[in-house]
Image (cartoon, helix red, strand yellow):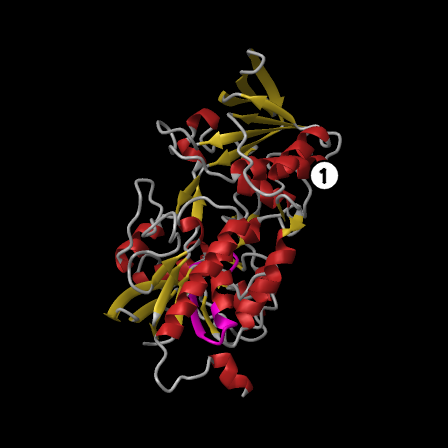
Amino acid sequence: MINRALVIGAGIAGIQASLDIANSGYEVVLVEKDPSIGGHMAQLSETFPTLDCSQCILTPRTVETGKHENIKLYAYSEVDTVTRISDHHFKIRIRRKAAYVNWELCTGCGVCQEKCPFKIESLFERGVGPRKVIYTLSPQAVPNKPVLDADNCRYLQSKWDIESGKTPALDKQGNPAKPKCGACVKFCPTSAIDWEQQDTFYEEEVGAIIVATGFDLFPQARLPEYGGGRYPDVLDSLGFERLLAASGPTAGKVLRPSDGKTPLEVVFLQCSGSRDPERGVPYCSKICCMYTAKQAILYKHRVPQGQAYVFYIDIRAGGKGYEEFLNRAQEEDSVIYLRGKVSKLFQEGDKIIVKGVDTLSNRTVEIAADLVVLATAVIPRLENRQVAEMLGLSWDKNGFYTASNEELDPCISGIPAVFMAGTSLGPKDIPETVAQASAAAAKVLSLFLRHRLPHETALPEEKATS
């Protein structure tokens, strides 16, 4: 058996599992599809119920992961194929996507991003802020190396048009045509921009696999009654997190995306797509009640003169300190909770009109909001099905992975030497995700110890200190 683990996904679950295994002396191959690690936790401002800074918790772990001698990190990469040699031996083919930047030469100075003249909508910022065409996900990115968005790069697109014959090879003066822009090349101090870079493939051998591929949010486009994504001042929960985050596009100031004004009436709509089998998903997304309370509290801290409203079906605050946190939102920060679903919302001038019913008082409620925040449902990533088919994992009717025994073995897949952790199994908060990641790592370490070779009489850390 090869005592080396593969971890797929480098959100907080993948990071925790990798560090637990690596700190025990075993090697880890960590694969992340984004340019940097941290997952959705890297997008958060604070965490509930303590209101600790998310980056203050996460950044030391991402830095440790990036520098750990026992962790081989493949960022901006995907697992291409998995070949099982035996129950505890896998050959893995990893595809690293072309970044058009030589990361060996790049120092992460940021000059290319500063000089790039073009901006597009940032997926990381959830539409509330732009990014450059050459970019890193955040100032705390690990690895702190940029990637170039080829689909929106003027230089690459014009270069490819010339090479394919779509654009004449000669300019109007009869000289060889030159691609447009190229500012990043002109100003890069280490000549790290590589226009010819291609996807590269690597092969690794491991003895165990942990799948921690995470989650996505239910798309606003599938909620036409809430604007279907048409209104700039209707955000999903992660979009509002980016407004609250000090590293976000507004440096932590709560400003309306449409006009940059401070919103004085903010409405939060819980269960946006959750518990709605006809138009959304049938299950509860578990974390929405708590992060909505957190966001309402943080909004009041940023805008004390503002008013926050929360429409809810019922409150599910099952966790240590969660009920007290919810009471704090209502009693100390004067957040108004209205029990009922919102039937629809629409734009009227510079306001978003929210129409709903307060079922406790049996009254129709209409609020002219400056900003609306949707607690959209937690859903499995589209890529999860591909990973499941590659490894032979099973999934439920909603697309989440299923464990061999949900009650007693929640991180065991039923496939030899393949384990799972985090929100790829279903909605979870950060503490539960971290605990399950450590449990999956413990299962891997137990497997490695049971299959030590005869000459391996000492643990790796014991050998290092002997």
- Residue at image location 58% in from the left, 12% down from the top: 361
* Residue 322 locus on image (x, y percent): 60, 39
Residue at mark 1: 302
What residue lies at 60% left-to-right and 19% top-to-bottom?
367
Above or below, 46 against 294 in this view is: below
Amino acid type for the residue under numbered disc 1: Arg
Name the dominant secondary structure of the magenta segment: loop
Q: Is residue 259 above or below residue 309?
A: below
- Left of 212 or right of it: where is 12? right
In this rendering, position of residue 433 left or right of residue 245? left
22 in the magenta segment = yes
Q: Is residue 260 visible?
A: no
Whether 64 is among the magenta residues is no
Task: Indicate whether 261 appears above or below 339.
Answer: below
Q: Nearer the viewer, residue 322 or 338?
A: 322
Residue 158 location, x and y as percent? 41, 59
Res 422 seen here: yes
- Looking at the rendering, the stretch of residues picked out in magenta corresponds to 21-38
Depth check: 313 or 461 in front?
461
Instruction: Determine the residue located farthest toward the right in the rendered image.
Output: 305
Along the viewing direction, whichever of 189 and 72 lies nearer the viewer: 72
